[in-house]
Image: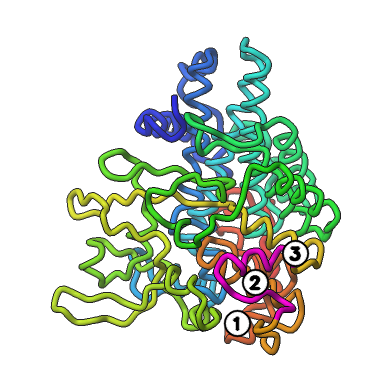
């Protein structure tokens, strides 16, 4: 079955996986006795693997924890009018989070539910009487997802319970917060396992599946987070030398709705649009809530700050493709408000007043690899490839704004911000380079080192008092 298709079946399995007694880790075993007979055939595991991949639709959604952390907790985005509990959502951009925040609890549950979907496949594949090569492929894909999810979780919460198998509700109470070093060791193990066994790239009908290049790129980010630039360089150079990836000639082509899974894409979440669910939610969610011309249900998520807009150099074509300056309402009046434009789909099919956009979402792309190589090596030539694509002078060349970005480190920070704007990188970049507090405080954010992680949800601690709260909360 092609990845991300037959979504109704995938979601049904997802409900089955989650349809167990709730506990604070969302990791209790299947409650349906028939499920014990499910994990037998290759078709069973194909469906279960698709269910695990379908968790990407939640964890990388426009209003996911990764989005809130990467953009709202950075200097890239803000919120005006949004649905739900306004105070709980504004708290991210204002650094006013507290343990009772309903969104923080939602993000916690979503990530542990995703991990359960991964762990159940890894657990059941061991006893399955299937071809060993197929089993190893499944193990590699699931361990890629698990390593990636734990990477984001430790970024968002710091130490968290480290669970690598399905648990009973009773067992889950024995799992307290693991040290970060232990979590990173598991992430490294998972991604290394995946990188050694996954194919160089994925092709039809397996588009959207993890590849060797995706595992190596995430592994490099983990090494950089831990300060091991030599190991990161090794992984990134392997991605470059694989010959599987290249920058597209035109930056605009990255965002054309029809251009999916291009040579620049390393890991991409697949959407179908139109009548073929799942449709892409980014264009709708990132449109202003009062926008009744471009979309019927603008979500108002990740509205663009003036600070991000002004980060782009004059003449940088990426600014116009990244940020819309406003819209014309039904009365013919132009409303000035900056919002993301990368995922625009003006030809989207409209069903029941909702635009069913057809864009994919790139989690990793080759420009990211090149910029990470500059971070790992200090060599600006990789960064300059990214700038050359959009016709801008490179670092060290005539015309480069060296008065604003006089060092390779500051040049890289600037380039990652504009090249990867609103693609869920900024906050994690600032944390990895140790610049988050300095940069964000200078822009009026009341952030401290302790508040670079979210609070542990109060509901979690009520269910298991052995789980300690982060010090800043």
Quadrant holding the N terminus: top left
Q: Is residue 414 left or right of residue 107?
A: right
Residue 395: horizontal and vertical position, in percent? 71, 76
User: Which mark lies nearer to you, 3 or 2?
Assistant: 3
Residue 446, numbered circle:
1
Q: Secondary structure at mark 1?
A: loop
Q: Secondary structure at mark 3?
A: helix
Residue 197: horizontal and vertical position, in percent? 71, 30
Residue occupied by mark 3: 374
Instruction: Give the color scheme: rainbow, by chain, secondary structure or one colour.
Output: rainbow
Q: Nearer the viewer, residue 324 or 244?
A: 244
Of marks 2 and 1, which one's residue comes earlier in the chain?
A: 1
Residue occupied by mark 2: 451
Q: Residues within 10 Å of mark 1 (few under 14, many from 20)?
A: some
Quadrant holding the C terminus: bottom right
Q: In the rendered structure, which segment of residues is drawn in magenta?
A: 381-397
Indicate yes or no whether the magenta region holds residue 223.
Answer: no
Residue 125, image quadrant: top right
Placement of 109 over or under 119, stated as above or below: below
- Residue 98 appears in the picture as rendered: no
* Residue at point 59%, 63% (across, down): 425
Residue 5: horizontal and vertical position, in percent? 39, 32
Q: Nearer the viewer, residue 149 or 373?
A: 373
Of marks 3 and 2, which one's residue comes earlier in the chain?
A: 3
Measured Cα–Cα span from mark 3 to mark 2: 28 Å
Q: Nearer the viewer, residue 40 or 135?
A: 135
């Amino acid at each position: 079955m092609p990845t991300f298709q037959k979504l109704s079946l995938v979601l049904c399995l997802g409900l089955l996986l989650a349809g167990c007694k709730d506990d604070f880790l969302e990791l209790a075993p299947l409650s349906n006795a028939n499920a014990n007979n499910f994990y037998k055939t290759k078709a069973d595991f194909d469906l279960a693997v698709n269910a695990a991949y379908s968790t990407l639709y939640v964890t990388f959604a426009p209003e996911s924890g990764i989005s809130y952390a990467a953009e709202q907790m950075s200097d890239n985005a803000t919120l005006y009018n949004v649905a739900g509990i306004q105070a709980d959502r504004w708290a991210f951009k204002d650094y006013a989070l507290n343990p009772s925040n309903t969104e923080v609890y939602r993000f916690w549950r979503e990530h542990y539910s995703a991990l359960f979907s991964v762990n159940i496949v890894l657990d059941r594949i061991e006893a399955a009487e299937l071809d060993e090569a197929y089993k190893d492929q499944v193990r590699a894909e699931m361990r890629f997802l698990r390593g990636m999810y734990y990477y984001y979780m430790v970024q968002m919460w710091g130490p968290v319970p480290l669970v690598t198998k399905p648990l009973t509700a009773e067992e889950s109470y024995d799992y307290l917060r693991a040290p970060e070093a232990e979590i990173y060791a598991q992430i490294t193990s998972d991604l290394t396992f995946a990188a050694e066994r996954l194919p160089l790239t994925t092709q039809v009908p397996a588009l959207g599946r993890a590849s060797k290049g995706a595992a190596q790129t995430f592994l490099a980010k983990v090494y950089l987070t831990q300060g091991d630039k030599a190991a990161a360089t090794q992984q990134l150079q392997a991605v470059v030398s694989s010959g599987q990836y290249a920058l597209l000639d035109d930056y605009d082509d990255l965002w054309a709705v029809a251009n999916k899974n291009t040579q620049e894409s390393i890991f991409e979440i697949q959407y179908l649009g139109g009548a073929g669910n799942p449709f892409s939610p980014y264009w709708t969610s990132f449109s202003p809530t009062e926008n009744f011309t471009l979309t019927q249900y603008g979500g108002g998520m990740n509205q663009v700050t003036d600070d991000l807009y002004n980060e782009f150099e004059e003449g940088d074509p990426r600014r116009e493709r990244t940020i819309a300056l406003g819209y014309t309402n039904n009365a013919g009046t132009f409303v000035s408000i900056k919002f993301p434009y990368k995922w625009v789909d003006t030809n989207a099919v409209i069903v029941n007043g909702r635009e069913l956009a057809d864009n994919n979402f790139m989690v990793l792309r080759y420009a990211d690899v090149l910029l990470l190589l500059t971070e790992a090596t200090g060599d600006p030539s990789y960064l300059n490839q990214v700038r050359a694509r959009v016709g801008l002078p490179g670092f060290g060349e005539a015309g480069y704004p060296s008065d604003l970005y006089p060092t390779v480190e500051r040049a890289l920070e600037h380039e990652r911000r504009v090249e990867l704007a609103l693609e869920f990188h900024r906050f994690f970049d600032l944390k990895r380079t140790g610049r988050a507090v300095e940069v964000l405080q200078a822009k009026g954010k009341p952030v401290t080192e302790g508040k670079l992680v979210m609070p542990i949800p109060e509901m979690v601690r009520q269910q298991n008092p052995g789980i300690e709260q982060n010090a800043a909360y």
